[in-house]
Amino acid sequence: MVAFSDFEVLDTIGEGSFGRVFKVKKKDNGQILALKVMKKQYLIQNHQIKYAVSEAQIMKTLNHPYLMKLVYAF
């Protein structure tokens, strides 16, 4: 199981109303990734849970050189 503590935050890439995107390094293998941290309370209050889940499902299936693929979700 993967957790936030498995990553070292290197930089902040962006910030929006749902949360932030960080550039991170996975501690065990050095892999550089983008990590999107979403505010759960905001998603619940604004009835956005289904959109976050849909986004994750779509990103899991992506296979395109210019689009990010979902590697981990927790």
Image (spheres, grey):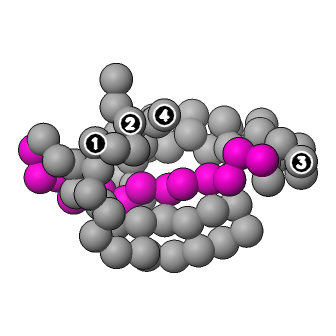
Q: Earlier in the sequence, mark 4 or mark 2?
A: 2
Q: Amino acid at mark 2?
A: Ala
Q: Alpha carbon of mark 1 to alpha carbon of mark 2: how far?
A: 5 Å
Q: Are marks 4 and 2 in contact (CB under 8 Å)?
A: yes
Residue 17 place in picture, x, y as percent: 73, 68
Q: Does 17 lie within the magenta span?
A: no
Q: Residues within 10 Å of mark 1 (few under 14, many from 20)?
A: few
Q: Amino acid at mark 1?
A: Asp
Q: Earlier in the sequence, mark 2 or mark 3?
A: 2
Give the labeled residue for mark 3: 45
Q: Quadrant of the N terminus?
A: top left
Q: Earlier in the sequence, mark 1 or mark 3?
A: 1
Q: To which quarter of the image does residue 15 belong?
A: bottom right
Which element carries disc 4, helix, strand or loop? loop
Give the labeled residue for mark 2: 3
Magenta segment range?
29-41
Q: Alpha carbon of mark 4 to alpha carbon of mark 1: how far?
A: 11 Å
Query: Along the horizontal axis of the image, is 9 left or right of 59?
Result: left
Query: Along the horizontal axis of the image, is 36 left or right of 3?
Result: right
Q: Is residue 65 visible?
A: no
Q: Which residue is depicted at the point 67% across and 38% down?
A: 54
Q: Amino acid at mark 4?
A: Phe
